[in-house]
Image (cartoon, coloured by chain):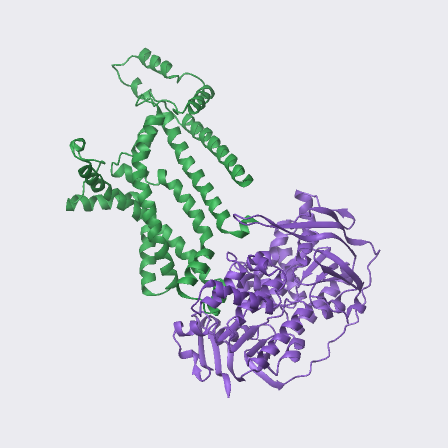
Chain colours: A green, B purple
Amino acid sequence: MRFVLGRLGHSVLVLVLVSVLTFALIELSPGQFFDDLKVDAQIGSTTVETLRQQSGLNETPLTRYLAWTQSVARGDFGVSLAHRVPVGSLLWERARNTLLLTIPATLVCWLVALPLGLWLARHRGRWTDRIFTTASSTLVSLPDILVALLLLLVALRTGLFPTGGMLSPGADTLDAMARLRDLVNHAFLPFCALILVLLPPVIRHVRASAIEAIDAPAVRAARGHGINGWHLTTRYILPLSANPLISLAGLSCAALVSGSVLIEVVMSWPGLGPLLVESLLAKDVHVVLGASMLATMFLVTGNLLADLTLYAVDPRVRS
Amino acid sequence: MFIFEVEGLTVCYAAARGRRAVDGVSFALGAGEILGVSGPSGCGKSTMALALIGLLPETAQVSGAIRLRGRDLRTCSEREHAAIRGADVGIIFQESALALNPLRTIGAQIADVVCAHARGDRQSARDRVLTTMTDVGLGDDLDRIYDSYPHELSGGQRQRVLIAQAIVNRPAVVIADEPTASLDASVRQDVLDRMRTLSARQGTSFILISHSADVLSSTAHRVIEMRDGRLATAAARRTPAPRPRASVSFASVGSSALAIEIRGAEKVHAQRRLLSKRHFVKALDSVDLRIERGRTLGLTGPSGCGKSTLARCLAGLDALDAGEIRIDGRRVATRRGRDRQMHRNQVQLIFQDSAAALNPRFTVHEAIVEPMVVQRASTTAERRLRVLELLDHVGLPADALTMRPGELSGGERQRVAIARALATHPRVLILDEAFSGLDVETRQRIIGVLQGLQTTDGLAYLCISHDIDLLAELASEIALMRDGRIVGEQAGALMGSMRVPA
């Protein structure tokens, strides 16, 4: 219990530090939200000045940061200057779309990677292992954006899948089943891109940990006593290789909101990605702050979950 | 009629450029026979043991024939081999800290061996496991040990778990690789007696690998000796060579001030479970000890009595719950930061599992130089010289510098650990079963080195061992520990005849 409380306190501290850092970084970079209007000849400088005054941008950075923390306490996370709505509701809508994509992708990724990685480790050095290892290292070294663009190209040439958006125009008029089909149809391409990006590193980690476990004296001793097959894999190899994988799974929680930014932008999926890029370019401070807080929250929660899991499965951590 | 025959067994590794780890070894084993295998560390004993049950890595090239009741095991498929291992041929490994799965309870791991070969529920397996655990001397507190994890047991208890795993299915042949290295004298004799009983009553055959002439001569019917992978001699019942009783004078250097003083030390271990209540074990119970400069104190006692806990507290790795430790008259128990670093430099610990104590990724040079790098008190060139000097002290050649622990034998690894411990010029050295993996020659050589350091630098030693004869030879006084208490202290010479109650 003290362990959990300690970790929670630690997490809050991380969140505060990240918010300060993000805020400072945005402040330090040149330009402000209304600067674009200044070059517009039709808008007078007094108008821009009034707008700045209304939005509170003339205050000192410290006052604005404190005002933002108050809005966090209220739960609305400030107001988006571009959208003129509270950041909280804006982020929630976009985050929902992102999670719709990333949660299934992450689940599928682990469900495939665990058995495949173990299997590759047990058949280390055979031709199947070599093919998979080469393929995965190629995919690991390809940038996300290239994978997404290649898939888009395929979709364009074949015309099998829509190349952007989340629903077809006029989807509101369709009945529930048809809408779902439309959604799946649109999600398929970004989903594939995400899997191609997430899967290879996880497979490589599973394979490496499993190989280390297979070579461990404890597994050799178990084999020396005739323990083999399924029992050896599930009771000896898997537990012995689990610790680094649990930590990795914790980290992949963080990727749930931040891992798909590029793919969403390229495939115009209306998630957090496009919103974040747009807000960064426009210096929409509160949206950027809110998004980084959300990503940090996922990271911290993921790590906390991983630590708790480790505590539960490893008797050495408990003592 | 021989039950187990080995003919021209040869093992070589491609990486070793054709050097043969095992070279044309042949022997035959009758039912109920105990065959001893002796030889210095690195002679290929352990490689042979792995080859016999087909557990060498795929990079090893094995040739020759291994026949069990006339059936050649070398032609078996992996599946057929797995059915034989643990059922017809049992094996006892030597590094008990590594040979058990740290995430699984002791009882489950022994039951796994039963269930791997028999159809039946885990309940009937449990009964059989409990019987076997009693057989190997894990009798008291049986249920607690059954549900314990390996790191909650002492080295001696873990070693007995390995023996239980090997014999639980009553195999025809048991390969025992240094099975008694970490057991206390009385239990060792007990285990060896049990082997003899098993061989006489049930016709179980043993291949008993040991560097200890005492163990082999008291137990084995026949001893073969290996050197550089080959069989040297086959002698029937060798008479043990008389143990050289070095009459070492422990001349105290300078004043006979106390190097270590421990007063009223207490330490309680909690065994935590995920859901059930905690369990408390009193590992140290008002312990008082004194060692003068330039002298050696022997510490002995049954497995799990708190010897290793005392060593960890003394070395500053664990904190005492109560009591105090003084080194050279200065109190250390509550020191922090810089002081604690000083404390750890002054007291160095040498463990019984040398494979677990060295980082497998470090070369020998990196391992020995690391404490000096941490100290930041010398130049690279000075360190290099010191490493060579230390290697020479422990009798390792300079070309061992670039090797990693995996390429060294158990004895060689232990010598690296000793060299590393000496690197910080410690005042006190704790030897926690440090000699149990070494053959007699190496052991005598290292004892010589340690005694030399004692007379020149006035080092104090706390030597923890189950081997009373060894302690009598090394130590001026011997303390006996039981259930976390010091229950007796005597001059070394008087202890020769005394036996530790189990």
Q: Position of residue A244 (x, y in %)?
A: 45, 51
Up the image or down, B482 lies above or below A244; here it is: below
Q: Residue furthest right?
A: B255
- Asked whether the viewer can see residue A176, the reply is yes
**Residue furthest to the top:** A46
* Apparent side of residue B299 relative to residue B31 in the rendered image (left or right): right
Q: Quadrant of residue A262?
A: top left
- Residue B133 spot, x, y in % from top left: 58, 66
Q: Furthest residue to the bottom?
A: B1
Residue at the image point whose x is 59% and y is 48% from the top: B278
Near-viewer residue (A28 or B336)? B336
Q: Is residue B369 above or below residue B24?
A: above
Considering depth in this image, is A45 or B236 the residue closer to the camera? B236
Q: Quadrant of residue B185?
A: bottom right
Query: How many numbered badges does the structure rendering display?
Result: 0
At 29% from the left and 33% from the top, the residue drawn is A274
Query: Quick check: A55 left or right of A172?
Result: right
Residue B366 makes an appearance in the image? no
Viewer-nearest residue: A234 or B332? A234
Percent x, y for residue B224? 59, 82
Quadrant the N terminus of chain A occupies: top right
* B60 up-or-down from A204: above or below: below
Query: Residue visible at 51% across and 86% down?
Result: B2
Residue in the picture at 70% in, 43% down: B334
- Spot occupied by residue A91 in the image (x, y as percentages of width and height): 34, 30
- Residue B442 vs B478, above or below: the answer is below
Q: Quadrant of residue A47?
A: top left
